[in-house]
Every structure is written in structure tokens, then in C-alpha cells.
């Protein structure tokens, strides 16, 4: 196994460490992959009219920064919070920073 941020570690944690009542089946992963390949909602992003905070992690291997920036461009009244030192699991790596950003967003948009 490789270190923190490695996709294999992330998958290992999900499959073998996290206890589940109804564990994910292989067919569930296949269904999700199919949905990601065929379900396109990009044009719907323009219809979101709720203030939106998007968290962008520089080392995110699942959702590239380019895609995160695309969300900010497409969603009106959105802001992109860039977390430089972490990957997809930013809430685990930088919980205090993420919580601060969330609370600031809530205060600004209530």
C-alpha cells in the first residue's frame, strides 16, 4: 500500500476498514461507472440559484482541478475554495480548515 492520498488506500479503506450493514457490491461500482459515463447534467448547472461553495483540492485525483473550476464557471453565485495541501479526502486531511470555510460560507449567505 502507498501513502495518504493514494487512490488504492482510499479504496482499501472503503472496502475493508469501514464497517457497513449493506456492503457495496461489484455491480454497484459498475452501475456508478455507467452513470458517470452516460448521465450528463452540465447544462443544469446554470439553473442552480442557491449560493454554492465548491471545495477544490489540488491533489484530488478523482476530480481534477479543471473540473472543479468548470463547476465554478457554470454555477451562478458560486465560489471555489482551493485547498492546496490535500487530495479528495480534504475533510479528513484538513478538517479545521474545511470547517472554517463552511462556517464562513454559512455566515455570509444566511
Image (tube, rainbow, N blue to C red):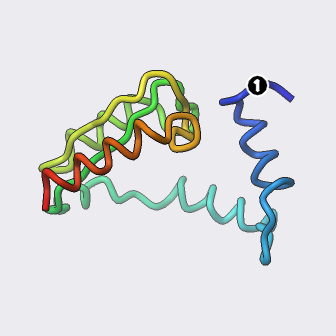
Residue 31 appears left or right of 3: left
Residue situated furthest bottom in the rendering: 21
Comparing 48 with 14, the one in front is 14
Residue at 57% of width from left, 41% of height from top? 89
Which residue, given by chain and number where applicable, does mark 1 sit on?
Answer: 3
Q: Quadrant of residue 48?
A: bottom left
Instruction: Quadrant for the C terminus, please.
Output: bottom left
- Front one among 49 and 41: 49
Q: Is residue 65 above or below residue 101?
A: above
- Determine the image quadrant of residue 3: top right
Query: Is 71 placed left or right of 4 in the picture?
Result: left
**Residue occupying the point 77% across, 36% down:** 8
Looking at the image, residue 99 sits to the left or right of residue 62; the answer is: left
User: Tag 1's secondary structure?
Assistant: loop
Percent of width and height locating residue 103 = 28, 50
- Please state the horizontal and vertical placement of residue 33, each as a whole percent of the image: 63, 55
Amino acid at each position: 500500500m502507498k501513502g495518504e492520498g493514494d487512490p488504492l488506500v482510499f479504496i482499501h479503506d472503503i472496502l475493508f476498514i469501514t464497517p457497513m450493514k449493506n456492503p457495496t457490491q461489484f455491480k454497484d461500482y459498475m452501475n456508478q461507472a455507467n452513470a458517470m459515463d452516460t448521465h450528463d447534467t452540465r447544462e443544469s448547472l446554470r439553473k442552480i440559484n442557491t449560493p454554492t461553495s465548491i471545495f477544490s483540492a489540488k491533489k484530488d485525483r478523482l476530480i481534477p482541478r479543471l473540473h472543479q473550476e468548470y463547476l465554478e464557471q457554470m454555477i451562478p453565485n458560486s465560489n471555489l475554495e482551493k485547498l492546496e495541501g490535500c487530495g479528495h479526502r480534504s475533510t479528513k486531511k484538513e478538517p479545521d480548515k474545511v470547517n472554517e470555510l463552511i462556517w464562513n460560507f454559512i455566515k455570509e449567505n444566511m
